[in-house]
């Protein structure tokens, strides 16, 4: 049985798309550890902007996501506001021990049904459906687990979501699933990759002139 860790944030539509397609793309002899993490924590640690913080990139990203979903026949309805604060949803997943069925319901709440975590009534209905009391989201052990997930991800070199980690190798992004499968089936295919880490950096220029 191959052990995979999947770092994700419900804020990411790409995480939703990968979640919806991974069952058809990954081999059967695997076990996935679902590990919710705060995407904004990666942005802060690595000091870079998220796609929604650059207006033109934000618009393109939403167009691209809707196109991808259509191509894959995956229902997708944008939430009322994006980006949003996903902390309640991440903690909710932890309260439910990150069970696959719970993760699925939370993803569907945002990305299939277009519900809003900022709408108290809608969030309350989700909590009731999953049989979780609102005060459970504020438990210290739940908050600590979310922080530990982020620290663990950073230690592994994770810089964004969604990201699979297998054999201490990072497979970032919705479109890395096939790369992960190839690595699991034939790791020798990637034997030369170690040289990439030694590639020196040249001078970086950040102005057009």
Image (cartoon, rainbow, N blue to C red):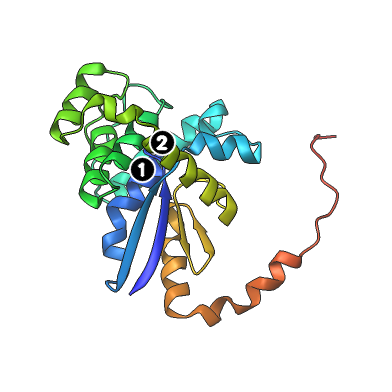
Q: Nearer the viewer, residue 79 or 123?
A: 123
**Residue 112 position in % (x across, y down):** 24, 37
Q: Name the residue under label 1.
A: 67
Question: In x, y percent, where is residue 80?
Answer: 32, 22
* Residue 25 picture location, percent across and down: 32, 65
Name the element at disc 2.
Answer: helix
CA–CA distance in space, label 2 to label 1: 6 Å
Secondary-structure class at tag 1: helix
Marks 2 and 1: CB-CB under 8 Å?
Answer: yes
Relative height, residue 194 to residue 106 (above, below)? below
Q: Specify the label residue 168 is tagged with.
A: none
Residue 157 seen in render = no
Q: How crowded is mark 1: few (under 14 residues within 10 Å), some or many (20 or more)?
A: few
Label 2, residues with CA under 10 Å away: few <14, some 14-19, many ≥20: few
Q: How many marks?
A: 2
- Label disc, if present, on residue 63 of the rendered structure: 2
Q: In this view, does 130 lie to the left or right of 4?
A: left
Residue 173 lies left or right of residue 115; in this view the side is: right
Image vertical order of residue 96 relative to residue 6, above or below: above
Instruction: Please identify the quadrant where the N terminus is shown.
Output: bottom left
* Residue 84 % position (x, y): 41, 25
Q: Quadrant of the C terminus?
A: top right
Vertical arrangement, residue 180 with respect to residue 87, above or below: below
Task: Choose top left, top right, bottom left or bottom right for residue 85.
Answer: top left
Q: Can residue 123 be seen in this view?
A: yes
């Amino acid at each position: 049985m191959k052990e995979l860790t999947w770092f994700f944030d419900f804020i990411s539509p790409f995480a939703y798309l990968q979640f919806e397609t991974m069952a058809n793309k990954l081999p059967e002899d695997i076990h996935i550890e679902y590990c919710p993490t705060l995407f904004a924590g990666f942005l802060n640690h690595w000091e870079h902007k998220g796609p929604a913080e650059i207006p033109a990139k934000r618009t393109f990203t939403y167009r691209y996501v809707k196109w991808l979903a259509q191509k894959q026949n995956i229902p997708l309805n944008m939430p009322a506001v994006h980006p949003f604060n996903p902390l309640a949803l991440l903690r909710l997943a932890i309260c439910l021990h990150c069970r696959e069925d719970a993760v699925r319901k939370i993803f569907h709440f945002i990305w299939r049904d277009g519900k809003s975590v900022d709408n108290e009534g809608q969030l309350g209905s989700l909590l009731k459906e999953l049989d979780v009391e609102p005060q459970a989201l504020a438990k210290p052990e739940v908050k600590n687990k979310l922080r530990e997930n982020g620290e663990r991800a950073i230690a592994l070199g994770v810089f964004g979501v969604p990201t699979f980690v297998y054999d201490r190798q990072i497979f970032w992004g919705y479109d890395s699933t096939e790369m992960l499968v190839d690595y699991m089936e034939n790791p020798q295919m990637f034997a030369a990759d170690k040289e990439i880490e030694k590639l020196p950096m040249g001078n970086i220029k950040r102005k057009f002139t």
